[in-house]
Every structure is written in structure tokens, then in C-alpha cells.
Amino acid sequence: MTAGFGWALGQIVAINLVLSGDNAVVIAAAAQRLDPLRRRSAVLWGSVGAVVLRIGLTFVAASLLHLPWVQTIGGIFLLAMGYRLVVPAVSAETHNAQVEGYWAAIRLILIADVIMSLDNVLTLAAVAQGDERLLIFGLVTSLPFVVVGSALLARLLDKYPFLMRVGGALLGQVGGQMILTDPLWHGVALLRRDWVVLSFSLLCAGVIATARRR
């Protein structure tokens, strides 16, 4: 192992520690309403599936993010998912609802994780500099960080249910930011200002965090 390879490896592990936090929050929130056994299973298989999808996504992420509408559509998806976390449509009172909720949680984990990981994947790709071994290692090693972090956060959500709104707000913030950083809006000077992007993303986070069932 060369010094350069070892340095890049260390960078990737550090990046995973920093960037996996947001994903762990969302995964824990998505699975929180399931019973403990189903929750662990949903977190594990949702995370494994998300890593597999990330590996495939790596080879197209750079070009995707430069296409108009991609980030806008992804941002809208995240806003909708944030709302679903805060205002769940599925009741957990019956066994059938639990089964439906289990698969709904896995779907939510997969989609939200992949959308939120676009920038993460690009960051890892930049560090790997075309070395597929490093890139795949970086994506695979993100799995334990996310799974362990999600399990710990799920326990906190049991104790402090209001933290579910934090997960929803996080999706809202990332979704709002993705929408306004879409190349689609690059011709609109006002929307490119940092304070506008920040204000809009915080507004989206606030709206979702305070959402109520009608």
C-alpha cells in the first residue's frame, strides 16, 4: 500500500464519519414507528440496499447533477418524504399496517438515502481520483457508520419522539437546497445568492417540522 493510497483511504473514512450523520438521522426516523425487530431489519436491509445503489450511482452521479431538473425533482421528493416522516399516512396499530409500514420504511430509506448521497458520492469520487478500489471501499465502509448510527438514533427517537421532526426538517433543508442549486435556475441571479438558498432551505425545513395532519 503506497502512502498516497493510505492517505486517500484515511480521508475516505473521515469523510464517511462526517457525511453519514444526516443519512443516519433520516434512516432512524423512517424506521422508528416499527416494532424493534422490524426496525432493526429495516435499518439493516435499507442501508445495505442504499449502499448497493450508491455504488451504481457513482458512475452517473457527476453527469446527473449537471442536468437541469434532476436536483429539483430530487429536492421535491425529499420534501415529500420529510412530510411523510412528520405526518405518517400509515397506522401502526395492526399487523397488516406493520407489514406495510415495514416495506414503506425500506422504500423511504432507499430513496432518501440515495438522493441525499449524491453530493457524498461525488466527494468520495473526487478523493478516489478514479481508483475504483478506493471508491467501492469508501461506499462499503459507510454502511457500518450508518447502521450503527441509525440504531443509536432510533433509541433516542423512542425516548424523545419530537426528534422525528428533526429528521423531517433535515430532509426539508436538504430538499430546499437541492431545488435552488439545480442548474435549471442558474440563469436567475437572485436565486444563486447564498442567503436566498439558505433562507429557502430553512423555510422548507420549518414548514415540514411544524406540519400537522389535516
Image (tube, rainbow, N blue to C red):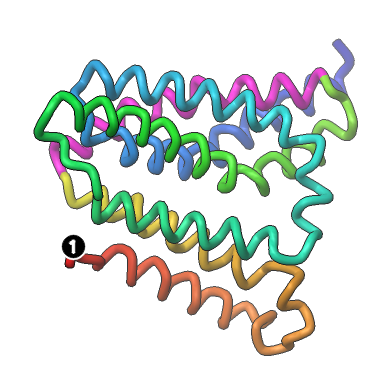
At label 1, counting other C-alpha atoms closer than 10 Å, the crowd grade (few under 14, some 14-19, many 20 or more) is few
Figure quadrant of residue 187: bottom right
Percent coordinates x, y for residue 125 in the rendering: 79, 37
The residue furthest left is: 93
Q: Amino acid at mark 1?
A: Arg
Residue nearest the viewer, comparing 193 with 6:
193
Which residue lies at the image location 28% right of the left edge and 24% below the top edge? 39
Reading the image, the residue beneath label 1 is: 213
Which residue lies at the image location 26% right of the left edge and 25% below the top edge? 99
Q: Which residues are magenta?
A: 133-160
Left or right: 84, with 60 as reference point: left
25 w.r.t. 142: above or below: below
Q: Could you tell me which quadrant the C terminus lies in?
A: bottom left
* Residue 131 on the magenta span: no
98 w.r.t. 78: above or below: above
Percent coordinates x, y for residue 190 in the rendering: 67, 89
Label 1 element class: loop
Percent coordinates x, y for residue 152 in the rendering: 30, 28
The kind of secondary structure the magenta stretch mainly shows is: helix
